[in-house]
Structures are given as structure tokens and as C-alpha cells.
Image: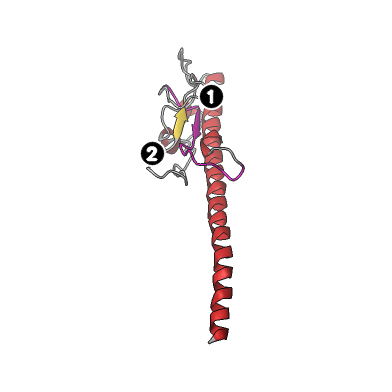
């Protein structure tokens, strides 16, 4: 009976040590997923802008005053465009919009337009220049996820 009690005590100690480590691993995995998702969307936004600039440079599309060349909404990255003949097919920039792993309330990504301030938490709605997580949680490095 004493051996059983000692074995249970040792197992309880090991479990109490393993639980915080597993929580840390889950948070680290979510952080990696957030970094990957932000990189995918931001790269797609930059590619969209580069194609817009190329289409203007090659005179495939006309320049509109006030037009920045960034997409009006994230769905534009999924639908794609041929840029009036720049590509023989509609070029899609993403297969799907990645999810924010820290989005608890299903708010989606925070967005900034080209005209917005870098620290703005309000989206002007003109275009999408940048995305960020809307989570106020603190990352393992001490920053908030919305600052990434």
C-alpha cells in the first residue's frame, strides 16, 4: 500500500510539472501559426500591389487619382484578377484567408488602409494595406499579438 501511495505521489508531481510545459507548447504553436498567417497575407498584399504597379507601368490599366493599388477587401486576394491582360488568367494571391489562432470572438483580422496611421486601431476602409491580430494577449516575448 505504501508503494502505491509513493507511486501516485511521484505521478502527481510529474503531472504538475508536465501541465505548464504543455500549455507553453500550445501557446508557442499558436504563435508560430500567427506568424505564418501574417506572413502569408502580407506577402499576398505586397504581390497584389506589385502586380498593380506592373499593370500601370505597362499601361494595361489607367491610373486613378487616389488609388493606391492595394485590394479593397481581403476577398480580392482570393478571387484574383488578370490586370487587363497582364496575365492570361486571373491571378489568385491566396487559396483561403488564414485564420487568426488567437481570435476568440471570431472578429477576424484587424486591417489598416494605406491612409491610416501605423498604430491606428480603426480601419479607414479605403483599401487594405496591412493586417494584424486583434488579440490583446501577451506573447511569450512580452509584446502583444496586435503589435506583430
Q: In the displayed image of the protein, which residue is found farthest to the bottom?
A: 1
In depth, the one of 141 and 127 nearer the eye is: 141
Is residue 119 among the parts visible in the rendering? Answer: yes
Left or right: 39 in relation to 134: right
Q: In the displayed image of the protein, which residue is found farthest to the front?
A: 2
* Residue 40 inside the magenta-drawn segment: no
Residue 146: x, y in percent?
51, 35
Earlier in the chain: of badge 2 and badge 1, it is 2
Location of mark 2 (residue): 107
Left or right: 106 in relation to 59: left
Callout 2 secondary element: loop
Residue 70: x, y in percent?
48, 26
Location of mark 1 (residue): 118
Q: Residue at 38% of width from left, 42% of height from top?
A: 106
Q: Main secondary structure of the magenta part?
A: loop
Q: Residue at 48% of width from left, 36% of height from top?
A: 91
Q: Quadrant of residue 77?
A: top left
Left or right: 93 in relation to 107: right
Residue 30: x, y in percent?
52, 49
Is 9 located above or below residue 29 in the figure? Answer: below
Packing grade of label 1 (10 A; few <14, some 14-19, many >=20) is few
Q: Quadrant of residue 126?
A: top left
Magenta segment boundaries in residue numbering: 126-141
In depth, the one of 9 and 96 nearer the eye is: 9
Q: In the displayed image of the protein, which residue is found farthest to the right?
A: 141
Q: Residue at 54% of width from left, 28% of height from top?
A: 51
CA gap, disc 2 and disc 1: 20 Å
Is residue 81 among the parts visible in the rendering? Answer: no
Colouring chosen for the image of the structure: secondary structure
Callout 1 secondary element: loop
Packing grade of label 2 (10 A; few <14, some 14-19, many >=20) is few
Quarter of the image where the C terminus is located: top right
Amino acid at each position: 500500500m505504501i508503494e502505491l501511495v509513493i507511486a501516485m505521489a511521484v505521478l502527481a508531481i510529474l503531472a504538475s510539472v508536465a501541465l505548464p510545459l504543455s500549455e507553453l507548447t500550445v501557446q508557442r504553436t499558436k504563435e508560430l501559426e500567427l506568424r505564418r498567417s501574417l506572413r502569408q497575407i502580407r506577402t499576398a498584399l505586397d504581390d497584389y500591389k506589385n502586380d498593380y504597379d506592373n499593370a500601370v507601368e505597362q499601361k494595361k490599366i489607367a491610373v486613378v487619382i487616389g488609388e493606391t493599388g492595394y485590394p479593397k477587401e481581403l476577398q480580392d486576394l482570393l478571387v484574383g484578377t488578370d490586370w487587363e491582360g497582364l496575365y492570361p488568367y486571373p491571378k489568385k494571391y491566396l487559396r483561403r484567408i488564414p485564420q487568426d489562432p488567437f481570435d476568440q470572438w471570431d472578429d477576424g483580422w484587424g486591417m489598416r488602409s494605406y491612409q491610416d496611421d501605423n498604430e491606428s486601431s480603426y480601419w479607414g476602409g479605403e483599401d487594405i494595406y496591412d493586417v494584424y491580430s486583434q488579440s490583446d494577449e501577451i506573447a511569450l516575448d512580452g509584446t502583444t499579438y496586435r503589435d506583430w
